[in-house]
Image (cartoon, grey):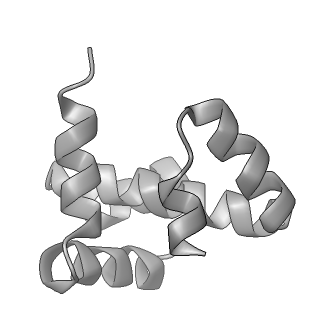
Amino acid sequence: LFAAISKLKTPREAKFFLRDLCTLAELKEMATRWQVAKRVKKDLPYRNIAKQTGASTATITRVANWLHHGMGGYKLMLHRLRAIP
């Protein structure tokens, strides 16, 4: 799976592949987690993040833990996407 994902070349390819791979609910949850990660990185209060994203505080806490103590995936992508105009 990871090898296949690493071969995606455009956001459009990623959209099509992930739409075939995941349910709409799974995609929505992943999109929400990504929005949470971006807000946690900005040090926004969890209650504000919950209000803005609809995520539970448990999800926000989990994402924050992975952002700060995970394998660096969130940090890597946040850094890479920051460089895009």
Height in image: 74 above or below 14? below
Q: Is residue 56 visible?
A: yes
Q: Quadrant of residue 72?
A: bottom left
The x and y percentages for residue 25 are: 80, 66
Residue 27 as seen in the image, left or right of residue 84: right
The x and y percentages for residue 9 are: 53, 37
The x and y percentages for residue 32 are: 55, 58
The x and y percentages for residue 8 are: 56, 46
Q: Quadrant of the N terminus?
A: bottom right
Q: Residue at x 18, y 27 (%)?
A: 83
Q: Quadrant of the C terminus?
A: top left
Q: Quadrant of residue 5?
A: bottom right
Residue extending farthest top: 85
Height in image: 80 above or below 41? above
Q: Is residue 45 visible?
A: no
Q: Residue at x 67, y 38 (%)?
A: 13
Residue 26 as seen in the image, left or right of residue 56: right
Residue 75 as seen in the image, left or right of residue 60: left
